[in-house]
Image (cartoon, rainbow, N blue to C red):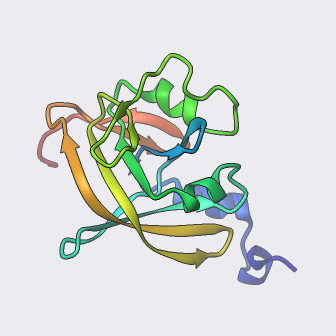
Amino acid sequence: MTTQQMAGFEARAFRDALGQFATGVTVITAAADGREPIAMTVSSFNSVSLDPPLVLFSVGREAPSLSDLLQAETFGINILGARQAAISNQFAGGRPDKWAGIDPITGTTGCPLIEPSLAAFECRHFATYDGGDHVIIVGQVLDFRTEPETTPLIFFRGGYHAIACGPAQ
């Protein structure tokens, strides 16, 4: 019996319910020794602490580059802007030529970063936790940059959206 069956609901219905929460879209990047840099689209990014500066995200255990990401000394978290849905799609999944047409910049820690992006954080591994079918990765922020005039790319109900910046009514 699966966990979903024991809980009394179907996995698809649970996933749809989770889709009611709008999230930003990030691309996690890291250098890989002698190979194309690691890159994966992730929407599970969150702040954790200001002192020390910590952030987290989660990655599915089946992700092809998870082991390489866990071995990387540092990694980048690139928050995508509203006009970067194509970049999000390009870095999602296991395609072999993820970086085609994208020339990353090198951050202060040596991480490949996507520019422009709404914000980019360069981190070192702080902790990892079991998250069921995902691994929760906590990073200590070593450096960051922002582009505050850009609007964010939002993932909501299974699709990309942009928001109008301004106060909620």
Q: Which sits in the foreground, 120 or 13?
A: 120
Q: x, y (%) of residue 19?
A: 52, 53
> How many dots with numbers?
0
Residue at point 39%, 48% (across, down): 76
Q: Is residue 100 above or below residue 132?
A: above
Q: Seen from this angle, which residue lies furthest left?
A: 167
Please say whether residue 22 is visible from this viewpoint. Answer: no
Q: Seen from this angle, which residue lies furthest right?
A: 1
Side (left or right) of 55 relative to 31 = left
Q: Seen from this angle, which residue lies furthest bottom?
A: 6
Q: Is residue 116 above or below residue 21?
A: above
Q: x, y (%) of residue 93?
A: 66, 39
Residue at point 46%, 21% (across, down): 102
Q: Which sits in the foreground, 7 or 63?
A: 63
Image quadrant assignment for residue 134 = bottom right
Q: Which sits in the foreground, 80 or 166?
A: 80
Side (left or right) of 145 relative to 57 = left
Q: x, y (%) of residue 158?
A: 56, 43
Q: x, y (%) of residue 78?
A: 37, 43
Side (left or right) of 137 relative to 153 = right
Q: Seen from this angle, which residue lies furthest top?
A: 101
Residue at point 76%, 78% (across, down): 3
Q: Quadrant of the N terminus?
A: bottom right
Q: Is residue 20 above or below residue 110?
A: below
Please say whether residue 70 is visible from this viewpoint. Answer: yes
